Structure formats: structure tokens, C-alpha cells
Amino acid sequence: MTKQPKVCKPHPVLHGIGLVLSVTLLVAVLVGTYVLSTMATIIDSFIGAPSGHYSDAEIADTKVKAEALAADVEAEGTVLVRNNDNTLPLAADNKKVNVFGWASTAWLGGGSGSGGVSGVNTDLLAALTAYGVAYNTELTDMYKDFQDGREYTRTLSAWPEQSGRLYEPDINNQTYYTQSMLDNAKSFSDTAVVVIGRLAGESNDATKQQYKRTEKGGDIVVDDTRTMLELTTEEENLLNYVGANYAHVVVLINSTNVMELGQIETIPGIDACLIAGLSGSEGATAVPEVLWGDREPSGRTADTWAYDLTTAASYANAGIEGVGKYSAADGLYPADGTTNGNLDTPYAYEQVSYVDYAEDIYIGYKWYETADAEGYWDAESNEHGTGYDAVVQYPFGYGLSYTSFDWKVTDAAANGSALTKDGNVTVKVTVTNTGDRAGKDVVQLYYTAPYTAGEIEKSSVELGAFAKTKELAPGESEEVALTVPVSDMASYDAYDANHNGFTGYELDAGDYIFTVRHDAHDVDDDANATITCSLPAGVQYAEDTATGNAVSNKFTGSDAIDGVSLDGSDSAQNITYLTRADFTGTFPKTNTPTRAMTDNVKALNLYTADDANGWINDADETITTGAKNGLKIEDDGETTDLGFRLGSDFNDPQWDALLDQLTVDEMENLYINAYGGLAELKSVGKSKSKDADGPAQIGGFTGMGAGTGFPSSSTLAQTWNADLAQEEGRTIGTQALQNGYTGWYAPATNIHRSPFNGRNYEYYSEDSLLSGVICGNTVTGANQAGIYTYVKHFICNDGESGIYRDSVYTWMTEQTLRETYLRPFQMLVEDYDAVGLMSSYNRIGAVWAGGSKALLTGILRDEWGFDGAVITDYCDHHSYMNGDQALRAGGSLWMAGFTGGEMAFETGSNSYLQALRRATKEALYMYLHVRVTNCDYADSIGDTTAVRHAFTTSVFGWRHLVALIDIVAVVLFALAVRGVVIDVKLRKAAKTEKKNS
């Protein structure tokens, strides 16, 4: 029998469906490809940049070291503030504890926002278990059932009253604390550890009310009589209970912010208290080690802890209640329809906001100590004491120890000497451990400058130098030297307040008193702990002592480069600034809730085309672009000899020939699309590079790949350990490289102007010197690793202005700006070789800080001699955070955002092109300079493995993947079309055959 040939049949339905699907896929792929192409620069910043190709072994080794270092920071940053009858350390045989407080089940490793950590891998409870200590799970399970975690952990997508919610069932509510549970707890252990936690973060300041949940699933209870930085009534009741029922009671403060803790002293039975700070992702492992004495809590407070936060001079002008609203400002940015995307729902700004730094220079201890010196607290009397003792609970620099120390001033040769303009004052102190346990101590040297009422504002004491000892065994001693440059004591006189015809930094004639102190308030009892030096005649510093550049008013009166005086004197702000001559009459009791905006301020609301055109200087020469000079700064990921040469010297003559090779398109792409990294510049061999947040964890906020989460910057500051900060910077830098990053959007050194500032955890301290030293050493460490840092936020992003940080008008005196807020940044530039800064969201006076010529050019470059790059913060709204304005003011890089951006105004003038070329040079210098530092560091320690790896591009990247998907989509479409065509042919053939038959 003959085999019949196979008959092909059409499949019109199947092939029709296939065609529809393939067309849909092809259209989707083509649209996706187009969208991706428009975001190619941003995508490259996260997944397309070259990599250092570090081995798994190298990465694992760094991770182990980083976690050990994080535990060191947590231990040294923990501050022991109370220890009655040596309750701590706990006995070695005490292996069971009751952990009270809902916050124990929601332990904080960091605050919220770009400065936080991506997760807490080891919390307090896990750390106790790992240490071999059992905790009462009946209590813990109850807390978790009551409220399983915070409802709002992202302050960037919540209102302050949401992210700041407090959770605690009342100890007297037997729905939660049943009698059997309480009885079981007493039987379980006679030790109670109580955890108090508070969360604040980016875009949300701490609230001056309490928003509480005290019933499972219940409504939020509002307590208008207490701020969120006070204990709740439920926490207070809990402390009263455990104080009355447990032999050993220890309180752990796990908070982003300073709190009011007076009840720790007044409630009977509270034995010990530790300010544990924020421990990062792993650092909580150190907390049990501190509690049981394997580690010494050698931290000192980095802020003043007052019994009542309303006593702070900044209180009235802090938080959302401290923000004023300009009247008749509708239509001005941001009350022009602009929305705030950092809340739980889109919110259109309804006001144009301002904040007055009416407290002037008097923040933190500079307020509390000076007020005490002037007798301001004399009438105070309460359960805590009288005078100063009734106001300040823990002074700045305060901390106890498990051991004891004796200090002897061994070199006070400066006593009785005359100061010289360029001289130093050095004091040496021998510290001896007189106790029976090993420990570290912190020696602090303060100075008091002569003050004349009504003239230059001065605090009664100011930190001049500090030193932390090594770990001293019982009986061991160490001599530390503390040096204060005379020029560091100069005050900035913006108004010629002392009537000598000079404005600028100066020293008044008179006695300068130096005191060796344990904290900002307590002078050591050694006979030589107070040293007096004299200055026979006033000294003026007309030039910057580091650069020799001329120094002059940049923000005041007719000298204001940006057009409006920073103090508001020429724009009817009518601010009464606190003055030492009359603390009682000028103390800011309330903020100014509203005032009119003058025309000169309105004129600067947004940058305009006229502003850009008016900036053109016809004398500016044209630039050369696209030259074929054959110069490269990198070759297949390796820095060339030229790259190292240029990174060593901003003024090297070869820069011009290199910059001549660049095209305008390359320079604009580098400038505009700076979010996530620096663009490729093929003409000079520069490869694409990646940058990432944040201060406590590289890549932890938005990055692709993250390092170890370290304790917060505020916790690091509490270590008072510069060496530890440098090691952390070096370690984060190494982890950055291992995760493919070459730049770090950190650290952040704004000032703790108020305890209510939402990002205080991300910053270091209320003190400029401590902030500058700890931040500076962090930057030094990162430089040594070979990554560049963008130290932020330049300048005065010291609070979130409630929710109004976007374009808030910020008013202060130039003295306050320079002495308090600019001082850490000046130290970073002049003393610690910082080559990258990030500007801020707020205005400095009437002008956006990122577009302030007075700030970015007048101070930063013309006075401090800064040669590096200034990047903007993330630009949500380009009309305000304007790339044209930033470039012309002296900025270097514009973080235009995910969707990119474009220059809005003229781009054809020589002035514009010269600015673009300058900005490119600054960015490239930053990029190359840290590679020089890295090699120098490796040479200095004799370790070639410390040299960062060359970064090379992977063979298969995301563009290849997109191309492959495109090809697959086209092939599938072609196959679907082929199937339909075959069906048509088969149908035609069938019809023909049928007709013929």
C-alpha cells in the first residue's frame, strides 16, 4: 500500500493569535527600548558602569572587617549617662533578662531617608541571643502582637505625624500585661532592660506633639502636652513599674534625636541608662557586650541633653511650628502648583516658607553655657536642682565610665604667655586609669575669649581641641597633647561691632582663658587645668589663614553678592537676633508666623532667562572643543600617567590640552546627568562611573549593591575618636569600590541646630569642631580608599522645616553662617582635602543654596581655594533647582534626576561655554585626585593591595540584553508573519485544488 503524503493544513486561529501577540510584544519592546534609551545615562549609573571585579574572597574579607568595625563604633559611641551603685556591667552569671518596651521589637539601626540603612540584620534581641543571654519571649510576643513593627518607616513617603508615631501599651492595661505575665516576668529574672525608641528622618522633622497607639488596632491618640522627644505617659508608667519591681533596671535609648529624660533621675529604682544611638545593620552585637562589661562604653554626648527642650534658643524657630509663611505669595515658588512628593500622597504646597535663625550663634552648649555665665538660669529651681543644674541634664561632651581616671596637666607652659597672630596654644595632659577595669577617656580643651557687651557676639566657652586616649589598663597612663591655633579663636565681625573700622575675622585684645574639661561645663580639678593667655592688641585676619586669599563680607548689606542681605535687614524681615548683651529681652519666645515678602526678595524667587543673559560677559573668550591631541586620563580602566599628573595638580598646564579634546555634548551630558554617577567622556578616555548614598551604608538607599550598615553619624560622633572615623571612611570606601561605586553621596555635616531636626542622626553634632574633625577623618579615609565624597549639604539643611525644606528661605547673620554652619565645611576643604561637596535644597537668604554665587564662588572658591566639584542635591523641580543657575553660580554637576534634564536658557555665549568647561575640569579633578591619594596611601603603608582595582566594563551589559530582547521580538514577529503567509498560501492552494477537481 502506497504511503500518502503529509497534508499541510492552515491554522488561521493559532497563527492569528500568534501574530497579535508578537505584534504586541514587538510594540512593547520597541517602546521599552525607546524609553530605556532616553534614560540610558541614569541606567548606566546603576547597572551599566565598569566594575573593579573584586573577588568573592576580597569582598567577604572586607565584610567581616566592616562588621567588626561597626561593633567597635557602636561600643565606643555608646554613652553611659547613669550608673547608680555600679549596676553596670551586669554580673556574668546573670543570663536572663526581661526586655520591656515596645521599641525593643522595632530596634532602630538608623534613621529614615538617604542616611539610613537598608535593614537591621542584628537587633537587640538577636544580639542577646547570640551573646548567650535569654530574654522573656512572653513579653516580646505580646509587643509584636500589639503592633508588629512601625506602620511608616519611610519618612520620604509619610507625614511627620505618621512616621513619628509612638507605640506602647500601658503597663496597667491587663489586656496586654496580664497578671500572670507580670508574675512570670518576675520569676524569669530580677533584671529589666527597658528600650525607648524614636524615629525621625529625611523630609520630616520630629513633632512637637505625640501621636500614639496605646490599644491594638486602636485610633491614634494625640497628646498636645508632650513632644515626641519626651517620654509618653505609657513609658513613664512602665518605668515606674519596673523601678518598683526589679532589682536591676537599665534603660537603653535607641533614638534618632536627643530627648528629654528627666524621669530617668526622678523615678525611683532606675539604676542605669545608656544612650545606645543607632547601631546600623550589625552593630547591635556590641550592646550586650557593653551591658555585661566585655566592652567599655567610652562615648561622650555630641549634643546637650536638656531637661526641657523649650529652653533651647532655637526651639521657637524649629520644627513645623517654627516655619513662617509669607503673605500674598500665591504664584511664587513653591506655592505655584508645585507638589511635594515626599508624603504619603501628592500634596500641593500652599505656602512660601521661611525659617529665622534668630538664636544667632547660640545653639547647643554655646547657648546653655553662655546663658549660665550671664546668670540667665539663676532663678531656675526644680526637682533636678537649681540654676544650670535645673536646666541641663547631660552637658555636651558628658559620659561616665566603668572605671575611673585621674588627670594631671603636665605642660601648661602657655600660662601667662602672650598670644601671637599665627601661634598655637598647646596643653598636655597625662591620663591615668585609677580603676580596676580597662577603659578609654576623652580630654577636652575649651577656650573663653574676651567679650564686651554690645559688641561681637561670643559664647562663654568653645571647644578648641580634644583627644581620646588609647585603651588604658588599670594603672596605665598616657599623655595627650591638645593644640588650639590662635586663629581658630577669631570671631567673624560682619558689622564692625567693636568699632575698629574692620569687618572680618578678628581677635579682641584681652585675656584668653583655656580650661581642661570633662565636658562643656565641668573643669578638671587639677591646679593647672585653667590657663590664661593675653593678647595685648586686637588682631585682624584680612586673609584666609590657609589660602592667603582675601576675606570679606559676602552676604551682608550692600556687600551681599546674591543681592539681598542674609540677615534680612534690607528686606523687612525684621528679625530680632538673640544677643548676649540682653538674653532676657531677645530670647526667641515665639516664631514670626507670617510676614510680607518684599519686591527684592520676590525678584529672586526663580532664576530667569534675563538672569542668564545678564550674566554674559562679552570679554569671555571662546573655548576649543573636539581637538585631536591624543591625551587620555584612563586607558582600559587604568589611570594613565597623565591622569595621575592632573589629579595631583589642578593648575597643571596640560589641563588645557586635555579639555580642548572634549565636545560640548560631552560636557553638557556630564554636567546635566550627574545623578547616579559621572558620564563617560570618550574623547579623553574617561569611563562611566557610579555614585551612591548614604552616610552610614554605601548603596543602602537606592544603589545596586550595598555595603555594611554602620552606626549613624551621630553615634560615630559620640565616639570622639578621629582614628575610628578614618577607619570607617576607608572601609566604606573599600566596600563602595567592591560594589562598583567610585563616588559617595556622603558624609553629611550639617549642624544639630535643634533637637527636632529630622536628619540629626545623619549629621554629627551641635558643635562645629567635633563635626569637622569626625567628618574630616571620614573623608580622609574614603580618599585613601580611592573614592571621592560629596560632603553634604552645603549649606544650612540643618532641619527639614517641618515638611517645607524645598526652597525654604533661611535667614541668619553672616557671623552665624560662617562660625557655626560653614566652619565644618571649611575644615574639610582646607584641612582634610575634600574634593566634592553637595549643595542643599533650602535657600540661603533669598537664593537657592545650590545657585548662590556668594556661597559657591565667593566663599568656597575665592576664599577657601576649593578646586573640586559641587553637585546639586536630587532636583525634584528644575524651575527652582535650576541647572542654568547652579552652573553660573559656580556649581559643577547637576543631579537632574531619573528623567534627566536640559539647560533652559542660553547656551551659545562664551560665558556659558567657559562655565561648562570649568565645571568639567572640577569634576575631572575630583575624579582623579582621590586616585592619587589612594596610591600615596598605599605607598605610605607599604601595601600594594590597598591600591584600588582598575575598573573595566563587562563584556555583556544591559544594552546587549536589550538588543537581544529586540532581536528575539523581531524574530518572533517574523515567524508569526511567516505562519500567516503560509496559511494564506495553503488556503489559496486548497481553493485552486477544489476548483480544479
Image: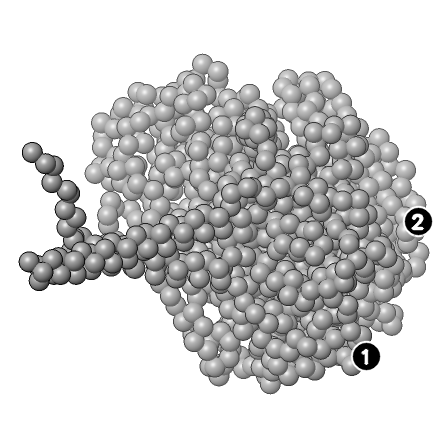
Q: Secondary structure at mark 1?
A: loop
Residue at the spot x=52%, y=61% of the render?
897
Question: Could you tell me if residue 949 is visible in this image?
Answer: yes
Classify the position of the C terminus by image quarter: bottom left
When the figure is inspected, residue 87 is found, relative to residue 550, above or below; the finding is above
Q: Is residue 362 visible?
A: no
Query: Where on the picture, by quarter, is residue 837?
Result: bottom right
- Please state which amino acid type lies under the numbered disc 1: Ala
Q: Pick whichever, 931 or 241, lies toward us.
A: 931
Q: Residue lying farthest top?
A: 93
User: Count of labels shown?
Assistant: 2
The image quadrant that residue 337 belongs to is bottom left
116 left or right of 493 in image = left
Q: Which mark is residue 619?
A: 1
Q: Which is nearer the eye, 805 or 678?
A: 678
Q: Residue at 91% of width from left, 54% of height from top?
A: 421
Where in the figure is residue 116, as x and y percent of width and height? 50, 46
| Residue 322 spot, x, y in % from top left | 51, 65
Residue 418, disc: 2
Q: Is residue 828 above or below residue 101?
A: below
* Position of residue 886 measured from the top left corner of the image (x, y, whole percent): 64, 68
